[in-house]
Amino acid sequence: MKSTTSLIALALCGFVAFDAGAQSCEAPPSTGPVSILILDSAQRVDAFVATVKDATIVARDRGTVIFADGRVVTADADVATRQLNQLGWGNRSIQVVASFAMRPTAAPRRG
């Protein structure tokens, strides 16, 4: 009964601010892996998240969105780490699903 109540509460809860700019909803504990998709900007995170249908968002903060099923879409791994720890998910295994390519450094100039 408690797990059903938790799931209903998760489905119905609104966002609650952790701190300025951060939003989260209490999520039931989970032991499954966390999958992280790292994008190169907060705008790309927002665009990607807008395409996701029928998923519950449990945390949103500065270019990072975390879904109840353990998917994380972020432009900042530090923010994602902080959010995962605040959700109590810091001990879950992490799978990096994709990452943006690093920009090549400029070639050294010749005299």
Image: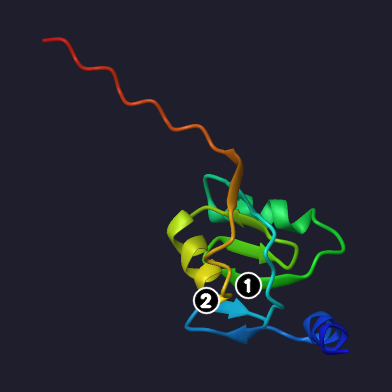
Q: Quadrant of the N terminus?
A: bottom right
What amino acid is at disc 1? Ala
Residue holding disc 2: 86
Residue 109 falls in image quadrant: top left
Query: Mark 2 or mark 1: which is in front?
Result: 2
Q: How many residues crowd mark 1 within 10 Å: few (<14), some (14–19), many (20+)?
A: many
| Residue 59: mark | 1
Residue 20 location (% of width, % of height): 47, 82
* Circles 2 and 1: CB atoms closer than 8 Å: yes
Q: Nearer the viewer, residue 18 or 89?
A: 89
Relative to residue 22, is residue 107 depicted above or below? above
The secondary element bearing badge 1 is classed as strand
Relative to residue 11, is residue 41 depicted above or below? above
The secondary element bearing badge 2 is classed as helix
Residue 11 location (% of width, % of height): 83, 80
What amino acid is at disc 2? Gln
48 left or right of 109?
right
Q: Quadrant of the C terminus?
A: top left
